[in-house]
Image (cartoon, rainbow, N blue to C red):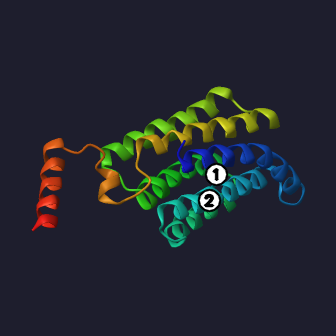
Amino acid sequence: MKRPVRTTLVYGLISALTVMPAAWSLAGPIGWPMAFTLVLWLDLLGYAALLAQWSGKGPSVILFPMALLLGTALWPGVYAGFFFLGLGIFSWIRSGSCFCATPVRAVAAEVITVGGGAGLVALLGPGSSLTWAISIWLFFLMQAVYFYMVPTSCSPNAVETVTDPFSQAHREALRVLDEAG
């Protein structure tokens, strides 16, 4: 199992267990809807920081998108907009800023993982703390699939997974000739 997959699964489990209690603890002072969006924003910030670390690009790649999403989280009454913008920004950070893939592969991976994760959340129709926890866990389960579709490194060797056997043999023969002579 790849390290990002394992860490995504563990992060999803931790998120599923902590998001609702954290939102309930903030609900008294600032109100339930804003508490819930801020806790989801913090959860996404933590995962975005992990994505930036895995890609080897500093935290600067996530600052602007997360600041934009924080503005939406603090804006009263735009909760559906926060969720949809959050999915878009999540895709932007992951495929646009952190990991490199061909555009078709990146779009396909995001449609499958983010669309599938959001679809599972909508299908479950969370209404209680337990169903929200299960929904968050299912969403992160779908996100783990991303790392099987897109390489976690931007090096040319990671992107090029299929090599031509003739070219490989030719390079090996040239290497042997260079060492011999």
16 above or below 122?
A: below
CB atoms of marks 2 and 1 within 8 Å: yes
Residue appearing at x 63%, y 63% in the figure: 70
Q: What residue sits right under mark 1 in the picture?
A: 78
Q: Is residue 158 left or right of residue 84?
A: left
Q: Position of residue 3 (x, y in %)?
A: 56, 50
Dot 2 falls on a residue whose secondary structure is helix
Q: Is residue 67 left or right of residue 11?
A: left
Observer-nearest of 167 and 132: 167
Is residue 128 in view? Answer: no
Q: Position of residue 47 (x, y in %)?
A: 61, 56
Amino acid type, label 2: Thr
Query: Would you identify the image quadrant in which residue 44 lies?
Result: bottom right
Q: Position of residue 100 (x, y in %)?
A: 37, 56
Residue appearing at x 85%, y 53% in the figure: 27
Mark whose residue sits in front, 2 or 1: 2
Q: Pointer 1: residues within 10 angstroms few (<14), some, or many (20+)?
A: few
Amino acid type, label 1: Val
Q: What residue sits right under mark 2 in the picture?
A: 72
Residue appearing at x 34%, y 43% in the figure: 105
Observer-nearest of 9 and 91: 9
